[in-house]
């Protein structure tokens, strides 16, 4: 952990920079934090002021949580408050796209209870700052014993998310859509179920997290769910997240797959107010799940 001294700064109201970059003085940092410190040094005052809700001159503590070739994730503690800083690599177009997708999704969803709170971003450094969200990942929480209750809550959560997510019109049916993407299954399983899939209409598009990893859903201390990663976010047919997450749960706990499906459908139906029917999503999910089983594909991200 690295301790830094934050000087006075000007609040940047959700957009770091705007000509406000200023140098900070700090002298020691762990080797793993060297690249982060070098990158955010001119922005440290603004980051500290934003995370601390305006506390001037507070000490800043940075903790490296996770790093890969494409990103570094850092916890920022200052002035009695905490933030989550995500610093994206800038090697190529793919890195830039990951940043832009997450930036745009968090900006569009700002203030929504279903996602972590966006505080700021800075295009020049591909940096995103959100409020630190206490809790545990859904991957760490779910077990064979509690999976039905969690699936029911997940269905309710996904319905509530779709209600607030940006939307676009779309026509067609699930057969033509899946033929276009194949979802790693090949054409066979989809073609065999074409009579079923052709009767299930698309009910528009919504901004989907588009990530089946249970680690990207936080269970808060109060038991609420929140999305926390939007690097893959794109507009997908309504119900896409329902399908993705059901498939992940069903592959993780195949012996409870039917119970999980029923519970998700119950939760989704209880909270959804649109044209999408949980029974129709379950029919699509069954086609995809059978296709995965028939093709012997690996389990989804956990």
Image: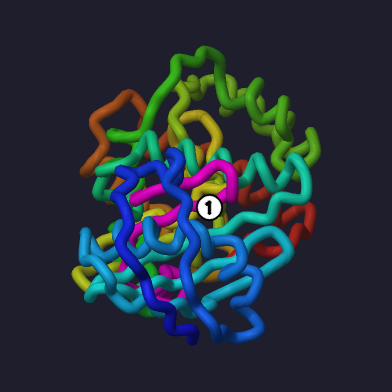
> On screen, 118 above or below 54?
above
Which residue was labeled with disc 1?
127
In this view of the protein, which residue sits in the foreground, 155 or 11? 11
Tell me residue 31's x, y (percent): 66, 84
Tell me residue 255's x, y (percent): 53, 70
Q: Which residues are magenta?
A: 118-142
> On screen, 302 above or below 198?
below
Residue in the image at 50% along x and 70% along y: 74
In this view of the protein, which residue sits in the foreground, 224 or 245? 224
**Which quadrant holds the C terminus?**
bottom right
Residue in the image at 35% along x and 49% along y: 118
Display colour scheme: rainbow
Specify the quadrant of the image occupied by residue 234: top right
Tell me residue 145's x, y (percent): 37, 79
Q: Is residue 4 left or right of residue 98?
A: left
Task: Identify the secondary structure beneath mark 1.
Answer: strand
- Does the magenta-highlighted stretch encompass residue 94? no
Q: Is residue 262 left or right of residue 180?
A: left
Residue in the image at 53% along x and 70% along y: 253
Residue in the image at 30% along x and 62% along y: 8
């Amino acid at each position: 952990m690295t301790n830094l001294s934050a000087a006075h700064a000007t609040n940047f109201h959700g957009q770091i920079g705007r000509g406000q970059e200023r140098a900070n003085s700090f002298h020691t940092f762990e080797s793993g934090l060297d690249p982060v410190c070098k990158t955010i040094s001119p922005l440290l005052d603004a980051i500290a002021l934003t995370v601390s809700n305006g506390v001037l001159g507070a000490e800043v503590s940075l903790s490296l949580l996770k790093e890969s070739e494409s990103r570094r994730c850092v916890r920022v503690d200052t002035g009695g408050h905490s933030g989550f800083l995500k610093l994206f690599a800038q090697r190529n177009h793919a890195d830039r796209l990951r940043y832009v997708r997450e930036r745009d999704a968090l900006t569009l969803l700002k203030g929504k209870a279903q996602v972590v709170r966006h505080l700021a971003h800075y295009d020049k450094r591909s940096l995103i700052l959100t409020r630190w969200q206490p809790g545990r990942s859904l991957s760490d929480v779910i077990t064979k014993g509690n999976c039905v209750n969690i699936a029911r809550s997940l269905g309710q959560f996904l319905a509530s998310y779709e209600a607030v997510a940006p939307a676009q019109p779309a026509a067609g049916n699930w057969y033509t859509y899946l033929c276009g993407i194949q979802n790693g299954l090949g054409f066979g399983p989809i073609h065999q179920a074409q009579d079923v899939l052709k009767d299930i209409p698309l009910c528009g598009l919504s901004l989907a997290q588009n990530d089946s990893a249970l680690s990207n859903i936080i269970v808060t201390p109060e038991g609420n769910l929140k999305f926390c990663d939007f690097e893959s976010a794109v507009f997908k047919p309504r119900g896409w997240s329902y399908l993705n997450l059901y498939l992940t749960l069903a592959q993780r706990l195949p012996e409870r797959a039917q119970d999980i499906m029923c519970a998700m459908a119950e939760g989704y139906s209880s909270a959804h107010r649109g044209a999408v029917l949980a029974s129709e999503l379950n029919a699509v999910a069954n086609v995809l799940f059978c296709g995965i089983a028939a093709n012997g594909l690996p389990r989804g991200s956990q």
